[in-house]
């Protein structure tokens, strides 16, 4: 029987384990910090608000127990990923393949997850990333979607796609490892902006946001050596419905509640990513008006309405330049 491992028992990680177990024929070994509320809930009840673990899914409270398998999916908060990599580096990981299923940039340097793993683990490992649209709630209703897997190793990309392809998730071959990770991370930031527009009831501006944001994100991708057109692919623009409109989106909901003066109380990965992006944009003089305005509203407590309005009151210019 095929086996793979999962590190991170949050909403998305647990679903990916369930998906591999129920759609791809894997026995799945799952790990999270033993004190994690998500882990404790699964240990005690074998379920969370979204799904019930199948019999071929096994929970472990010891990291070493899930490192025996060749394929390891990782889905944890991006700001905690470097710490995990330092912990992983103490084990022999030679030949292991890691599929990173997180969408964010490390603050303050805007580091992508792939680079962090390669930096911290000086072993012969294979690393790929998963990006694209999809919400657990929709998948559990059988609603299909698409995603992209990317890696700097073509054979790793090909192997993972063939192993994890199903009629629920159609997987595409990525062609821009840097751009797909930045695009996936940045869609969380744009999701906050969309939520703020919802909170202000300025719904008509969401179309303008959708049109302008990929251009801005493309500039950021280009700065890091990626293809700016990747911003129009599955990892970024393709994820907009799930992030800018869905009631299930943590980042959109954070923005909506923020605009209304309410506390969200859950992880919104776009918040630390926004801070990282702002620091890089300032240092490198990258024109990113949406992110600059968001930063003023979220971190500097500037007047929300005036700050968001300022995005659309800039000097006159051509749409494309």
Image (cartoon, grey):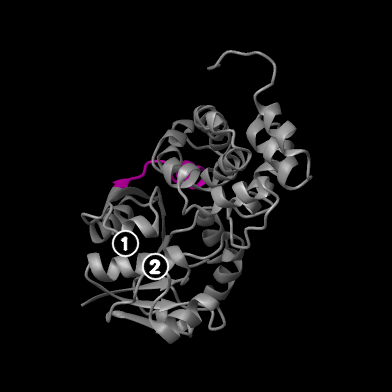
Image height of 175 relative to 211, above or below: below
- Residue at the spot of label 1: 140
Q: Counting other residues with Cα less than 10 Å from the Cα at mark 2, is it few (<14), some (14-19), or many (20 or more)?
A: some
Q: Residue 157's spot in the image, x, y percent?
A: 32, 53
Residue range corresponding to the magenta coloring: 172-183
Q: Are marks 1 and 2 in contact (CB under 8 Å)?
A: yes
Q: Residue 318's spot in the image, x, y percent?
A: 58, 13
Nearest the camera: 266 or 219? Answer: 266
* Image mark for residue 50: 2
Nearest the camera: 10 or 102? Answer: 10
Which of the marked residues, 1 or 2, is nearer the chain's N terminus? 2
In reply to whether residue 174 is colored magenta, the answer given is yes
Report the quarter where the C terminus lies: top right
Q: Residue at x 54, y 79 (%)?
A: 33
* Image mark for residue 247: none
Question: SS class of the residue under badge 1?
Answer: loop
Report the quarter where the N terminus lies: bottom left
Q: Residue 238's spot in the image, x, y percent?
A: 40, 40
Image height of 50 relative to 68, above or below: above
């Amino acid at each position: 029987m095929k086996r793979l491992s999962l590190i991170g028992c949050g909403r998305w990680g647990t679903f990916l384990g369930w998906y591999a177990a129920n759609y791809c024929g894997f026995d799945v070994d799952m790990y999270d910090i033993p004190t994690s509320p998500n882990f404790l809930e699964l240990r005690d009840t074998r379920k969370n608000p979204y799904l019930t673990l199948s019999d071929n899914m096994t929970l472990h409270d010891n990291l070493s127990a899930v490192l025996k398998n060749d394929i390891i999916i990782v889905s944890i908060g991006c700001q905690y990923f470097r710490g995990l990599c330092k912990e992983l580096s103490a084990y022999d990981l030679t030949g292991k393949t890691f599929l990173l299923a997180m969408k964010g940039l490390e603050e303050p340097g805007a580091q992508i997850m792939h680079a962090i793993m390669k930096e911290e683990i000086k072993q012969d490992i294979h690393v790929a990333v998963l990006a694209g649209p999809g919400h657990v709630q929709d998948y559990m209703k059988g609603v299909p979607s698409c995603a992209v897997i990317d890696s700097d190793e073509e054979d790793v990309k090909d192997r993972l796609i063939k192993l994890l392809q199903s009629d629920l998730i159609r997987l595409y071959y990525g062609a821009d490892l840097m751009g797909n990770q930045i695009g996936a991370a940045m869609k969380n930031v744009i999701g906050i902006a969309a939520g703020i527009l919802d909170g202000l009831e300025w719904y008509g501006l969401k179309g303008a946001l959708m049109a302008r944001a990929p251009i801005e994100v493309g500039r950021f991708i280009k700065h890091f050596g990626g293809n700016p057109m990747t911003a129009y692919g599955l990892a970024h623009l393709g994820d907009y419905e799930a992030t800018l409109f869905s009631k299930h989106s943590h980042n959109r909901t954070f923005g909506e509640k923020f605009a209304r003066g309410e506390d969200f109380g859950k992880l919104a990965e776009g918040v630390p990513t926004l801070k990282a992006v702002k620091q890089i944009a300032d240092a490198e003089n990258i024109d990113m008006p949406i992110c600059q305005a968001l930063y003023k509203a979220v971190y500097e407590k500037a007047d929300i309405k005036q700050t968001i309005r300022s995005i659309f009151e800039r000097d006159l210019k051509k749409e494309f330049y």
